[in-house]
Image (tube, rainbow, N blue to C red):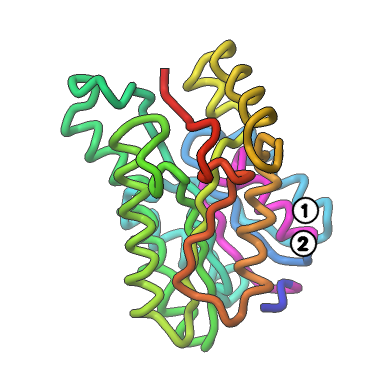
Amino acid sequence: MDMNGAAVIVTGSATGVGAASAKMLAERGCNVVINYTKSEAEAKETQAECEALGVSTLLCQADVSNDDDCRRMAQETLDAWGRIDGLINNAGMTQFVNHADLEGLSADDFHRIYAVNVIGPYQMVRAVAPAMQEHGRGAVVNISSVAGVMGIGSSVAYAAAKGALNTMTLSLARALGPEIRVNTICPGFIQGRWLRGGMGDEAYEQAVAAQERSTPLRKAGTPEDMAQAAVWFLEGADLVTGEVLIVDAGMHLGSAPLKAR
């Protein structure tokens, strides 16, 4: 896909992987929707950085767990540029609970995590699919997690939700071809405030050191590493759909598993 002049929605793009993806797309001449729920200041910073690269942006406050918000974001994109070429489903949430603490998660916790991490991406795909199908071409990238492959990570609910997102990718790839490609990346450890805030400073620094010491590539992933994979699925993978790509410096091969406190 030619990114120059294309229009791509990146959910949860105020910070982290979403922000890195938006900026990487802007570098390629892509017009970008910057989406946020609460982090307005950071979203505006991301917007400014993208516009400094010479592209147009749309700032959209929307909660992907709300179907009306998803449809509104898609319509605002069409109103701005008359097209939707790509979607990166990055918005996500979790609750940090040790997997052995079965009393640490309630049904409401599961519902809330699934609402954002599974239902949200589904609703976003549903909202953008008609425009992509009418155009004859489009691509979706879901940002999942190695937690959904290995059953590790911040909580059982998070791992289960990401596993569901992975299988949903396969279903949608079958259903939406040939016009729309649907792929997923599964990041491992990602440096940044999200994990630092959930793990605490000491555990976070230990995890970074463990990644740099014991993964085959000796690296702790960054938002930019994940964005690079996500953007490749949009622009460089025209014959790829239904793929679940692990991006974790080789952690899944057996070293440095992620654990909640």
Determine the secondary structure under disc 1: helix
**Residue pictured at 71% horizontal, 72% vertical:** 3
The disc labelled 2 sits on which kind of residue? Val
Where residue 62 sits: x, y (%)?
44, 48
Q: Which residue is mark 1?
A: 51
The answer for how far apart the CA atoms under marks 1 and 2 are is 5 Å
Comparing 91 with 184, the one in front is 184
Q: Is residue 108 above or below residue 137?
A: above
Q: Is residue 260 above or below residue 27?
A: above
- Quarter of the image for residue 84 reads bottom right
Comparing 97 with 45, the one in front is 97
Q: Which residue is mark 2?
A: 55
In which quadrant of the rendered image does the N terminus lie?
bottom right
Determine the secondary structure under disc 2: loop
Q: Which mark is residue 198?
A: none
**Residue pictured at 63% horizontal, 37% vertical:** 215
Where residue 92 sits: x, y (%)?
43, 42
**Residue pictured at 46% horizontal, 46% vertical:** 145
Q: Are marks 1 and 2 in contact (CB under 8 Å)?
A: yes
Q: Where are the magenta residues, as a range?
A: 4-27
Identify the residue at the far right of this view: 53
Identify the residue at the far top of this view: 202
**Residue pictured at 69% horizontal, 47% vertical:** 225
| Residue 17 drawn in magenta | yes
Comparing 137 with 228, the one in front is 228
The disc labelled 1 sits on which kind of residue? Glu
Where residue 126 sits: x, y (%)?
36, 69
Crowdedness near tag 1: few (<14), some (14–19) or many (≥20) residues, C-alpha within 10 Å: some
Where residue 200 sits: x, y (%)?
52, 14
**Left-right relation of 172 to 230:** left
